[in-house]
Amino acid sequence: MAAETIDTLVVGAGQAGIAMSEHLSRNGVPHLVLEKNRIAEAWRTGRWDSLVANGPAWHDRFPNLEFTGTDPEAFVGKDRVADYFAEYAERIKAPVRTGVEVLKAERLNGSGAFRVETSDGVIEAQRIVAATGAFQHPVIPPLVPQAAGVHQLHSFHYRNPGQLPDGAVLVVGAGSSGAQIADELNRAGRKVYLSVGPHDRPPRRYRGRDYVWWLGVLGLWDAAAQEPGRQHVTISVSGAYGGRTMDFRRLAGEGVTLLGMTEAFEGGVLAFAGDLQQNIANGDADYLQILDRADAYAARNGLDLPEEPQARAAFPDPECLTRPLRALDLEAQGITTILWATGFRQDFNWLKADAFDGQGRPQHQRGVSRVPGVYFLGLPWQSRRGSTFIWGVWHDASHVADQIAIQRHYESYRGPAGCGADQA
Ligand SMILES: Cc1cc2nc3c(=O)[nH]c(=O)nc-3n(C[C@H](O)[C@H](O)[C@H](O)COP(=O)(O)OP(=O)(O)OC[C@H]3O[C@@H](n4cnc5c(N)ncnc54)[C@H](O)[C@@H]3O)c2cc1C
């Protein structure tokens, strides 16, 4: 049986795949989107129960569709976000086929096309856009062996406090996920230890505006690269409980014990780096420089926004910060769970193309790979800080679709009459 053919195959129907479909349609590119689960599955089943978007509804969306029936300043729940993308796909009539996994894609010998094996047959495509996301496989550092007898799970598998065995919890990682989950567990009455690494923690709101607005007007979402030496800094923010600045001193005041980076495990004892004070100080510096830049922006543009000097007041240093613990005996402290909020890795195993570096990372320029016909979308810092986020991926998709349209334009050129293949 002849294989189904398509010009451009998009793999993955999360926000990246849906944005890609919209821009391909705008450019008149025939395409198909294959999704192994459901549209926006990660938002539906890959998040904890209480998760809300980190940005307000007016911001964390695509430009052409607002969240209806929601206060634009509110933080939308994860299921509503998933529904939004399903509705969006329907509106733009995105040609999405769900429940179909791409197993392998490789270029056919002697042809520009790719042979794509899927769980539902073979497809031949001229181009492939890998829109499978930056958050595919949870990563747990190999520090604590399973035999240690403590329950271990990744934030990807966390749902709610009731799911965890009784006892204290060590949350490792204080990006948005770890910090939010630590807050939730602490509110649920658990004793919580939080291992804090390098982070940025912008103010939730300042002078009446949400931080997403400040980062936008300051050009920080569009920054093309992180500052040198700060490659792995995560943003710690939260829309939970109406949206509060992620303040680790406040969390400590509410009962959470802060620790430095988790370093080693031996004989039931976890060791922590001596970097807690530095990590907190760097987070404070990031916070304060956003306030400074916001003030400068307001002054420069004559904005009549209420001044907020109290935003510079810090909570008192808790004892866990002035005299940080360097070791924790899990049993002695009653710690029954380690929750790893330690990030994700990408997986492009299915894509057999010379488009990766030695560590399997895509080699690309703004999503255009060095292999003709292979494109990526939704990668961290693909073109800018906002690239993995809802509002950012839409713009990256526009660029990738443009590049595809340009290639198709050249490919369709047949040369002057009487030249080329027809003459042979
Ligand atoms: C906890 C958490 C909270 C976040 N909160 C926010 C937020 O508030 N605001 C924001 O803007 N961003 C947020 N993000 C970042 C980002 O918006 C989401 O991770 C988003 O899901 C990324 O979308 P994506 O389309 O790039 O990837 P995904 O949503 O992961 O979509 C990729 C899709 O590809 C499919 N797929 C993978 N492999 C194959 C295959 N071989 N064949 C077929 N299909 C395949 C998967 O099933 C999946 O549906 C958050 C991320 C996390 C982890």
Image: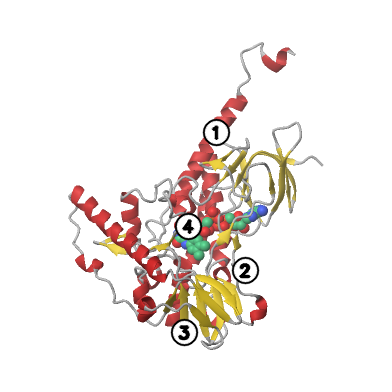
Q: Which mark is residue 232?
A: 4
Mark 2 residue crowding within 10 angstroms, few (<14) / some (14–19) / many (20+) = few
- Residue at 59% in and 82% down: 268
Q: Which residue is mark 3?
A: 191
Mark 1 residue crowding within 10 angstroms, few (<14) / some (14–19) / many (20+) = some
Does residue 304 appear to the left or right of 216 in the view shown? left
Residue type indicated by callout 2 = Pro
Place residue 371 in its image quadrant. Answer: top right
Q: Which residue is mark 2?
A: 142
**Mark 4 or 3, nearer chain start:** 3
- The Cα–Cα distance between marks 4 and 2, rounded to whole angstroms, is 19 Å
Judge whether 231 appears above or below 239 on screen: above
48 or 359: nearer the eye? 359
Q: Is residue 218 visible?
A: yes
**Mark 3 or 2, nearer chain start:** 2
> Closer to us: mark 1 or mark 3?
3
Residue type indicated by callout 1 = Ala
In the rendered image, residue 202, in percent from the top left (x then y), is placed at 35, 62
> Closer to us: mark 4 or mark 1?
4
- Residue at 54% in and 74% down: 339
Q: Which residue is mark 1?
A: 405
Say if disc 3 is inside 8 Å of ligand 1. Answer: no
Q: Secondary structure at mark 1?
A: helix
Does residue 397 appear to the left or right of 6 in the view shown? left
Q: Secondary structure at mark 3?
A: loop
Q: Is residue 238 visible?
A: no
In the rendered image, residue 20, in percent from the top left (x then y), is placed at 54, 45
Q: Secondary structure at mark 2?
A: loop
**Mark 3–mark 2 contact, CB under 8 Å?**
no
155 or 124: nearer the eye? 155
